[in-house]
């Protein structure tokens, strides 16, 4: 719960010195992956929580995921809180779990932003919010 508390307190990409940065690369825009590779990675990501028909694409996507995405999302795709990388194996999908949205996210990246609440809310309120977010599935 400490990570949630710190995120609420200092924000993501806010103007506070202790803010956390949540920034996903734009793999297509920055020419890090081809459209075909991005499609395969999307197939792999979707396979983590649902059956997929094109297992060859899933296998290729897993390889590209391990080379390009696992450093933030983890080799089991469970996420990396220190980097703001979400768990890709659970039912919590901030932008939606539609293949087109996943393709767009991988292609263009994401730059999360959240204000710092340290100067707006007292510490007790921030802790209560962290506990509430934790209860929604944001914690273990």
Image: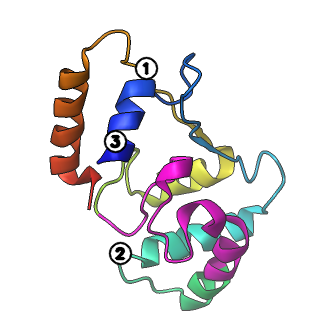
- Counting other residues with Cα less than 10 Å from the Cα at mark 1, is it few (<14), some (14-19), or many (20 or more)? many
- Residue that numbered label 2 is attached to: 49
Magenta segment range?
61-90
- Counting other residues with Cα less than 10 Å from the Cα at mark 3, is it few (<14), some (14-19), or many (20 or more)? many
- Image point (63%, 74%), residue name: 40
Element class at badge 2:
loop
- Residue that numbered label 3 is attached to: 4
Element class at badge 1:
loop
Magenta-colored stretch includes residue 69: yes
- Judge depth for marks 3 and 2 and give the one in front: 3
- Res. 16 image quadrant: top right
Q: Is residue 49 above or below residue 85?
A: below
Q: CA distance from mark 1 to mark 2?
A: 33 Å
- Judge from the rendering whether residue 103 lies leftward or rightward of residue 36; answer left or right: left
- Residue that numbered label 1 is attached to: 116
Nearer to us in this view, 111 or 80 = 80
């Amino acid at each position: 719960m400490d990570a949630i508390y710190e995120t609420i307190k200092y924000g993501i990409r806010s103007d506070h010195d202790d803010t956390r940065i949540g920034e996903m690369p734009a793999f297509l825009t920055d020419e890090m992956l081809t459209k075909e590779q991005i499609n395969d990675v999307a197939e792999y990501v979707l396979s983590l929580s649902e059956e997929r028909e094109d297992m060859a694409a899933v296998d290729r996507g897993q390889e590209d995921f391990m080379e390009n995405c696992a450093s933030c999302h983890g080799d089991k795709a469970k996420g990396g809180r220190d980097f703001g990388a979400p768990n890709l194996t659970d039912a919590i999908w901030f932008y939606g779990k539609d293949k087109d949205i996943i393709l767009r996210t991988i292609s263009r990246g994401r730059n999360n932003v959240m204000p710092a609440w340290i100067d707006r809310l007292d510490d007790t309120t921030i802790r209560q919010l962290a506990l509430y977010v934790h209860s929604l599935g944001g914690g273990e």
